[in-house]
Image (cartoon, grey):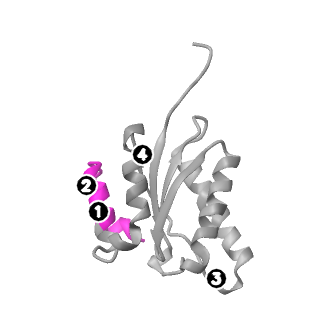
Amino acid sequence: MPQSLASLHLHIVFSTKNREPWLTDEYIERLYEYIGGTLRKSKCALIAAGGIPDHVHLLVSMSRELSVAAVVQLVKSNSSRWIHDSFAELAAFNWQSGYGAFAVSYSNIPAVQTYLANQKQHHAKKSFQTEFRQLLRRHEIEWDEQYVWD
């Protein structure tokens, strides 16, 4: 086959350093727009985003040319730089060092979009740690508690 084609979708989750509540309504939509632009420049697409002040969820259509780690590093480093350059009051902002990335089948994209859109209601009942553990279990990923939370 002379052409390479792919349909790769990921649900990516990462938090602010020490889960500090930096991402208030004042900043979050602009952050998602910036992340979307960063992804487009790399032949990826931001399909949906959601979160609360201490973490974000991104539904990303991946480029077939980039690794998961490269995309996450690109998003986190560029968005962190943009936050520091754009908002002097967020000078101490940082992302945590790790992330979670979960495969999403094309048929499940609408369900993940709904899940991301309802993050505020979801977290009225559940902590980030509980949610992240549930995602890890659902995707049968083993983890060591001492290394997950930074």
Query: Residue 37: x, y in percent?
Result: 68, 55
Whole-number angstrom distance, CA of label 1 to CA of label 2: 6 Å
Mark 4 closeness class: few <14, some 14–19, many ≥20 residues within 10 Å: some
Quarter of the image for residue 24 reads bottom right
Quarter of the picture containing the N terminus is top right
Instruction: Tell me which amino acid carries mark 2.
Output: Arg
Whole-number angstrom distance, CA of label 4 to CA of label 2: 19 Å
Helix, strand or loop at disc 4?
A: helix
Helix, strand or loop at disc 3?
A: helix
Quarter of the image for residue 109 reads top left
Query: Residue 132: x, y in percent?
Result: 33, 63
Whole-number angstrom distance, CA of label 2 to CA of label 3: 34 Å
Towards the viewer: 102 or 122: 122
Mark 4 or mark 3: which is in front? 4
Q: Earlier in the sequence, mark 1 or mark 4?
A: 4
Question: Which residue is denoted by mark 2 in the rendering?
Answer: 137
Towards the viewer: 120 or 74: 120
Residue contact between numbered discs 1 and 2, judged by CB atoms under 8 Å = yes
Whole-number angstrom distance, CA of label 3 to CA of label 1: 28 Å
Answer whether residue 56 is visible to the viewer in this image: no
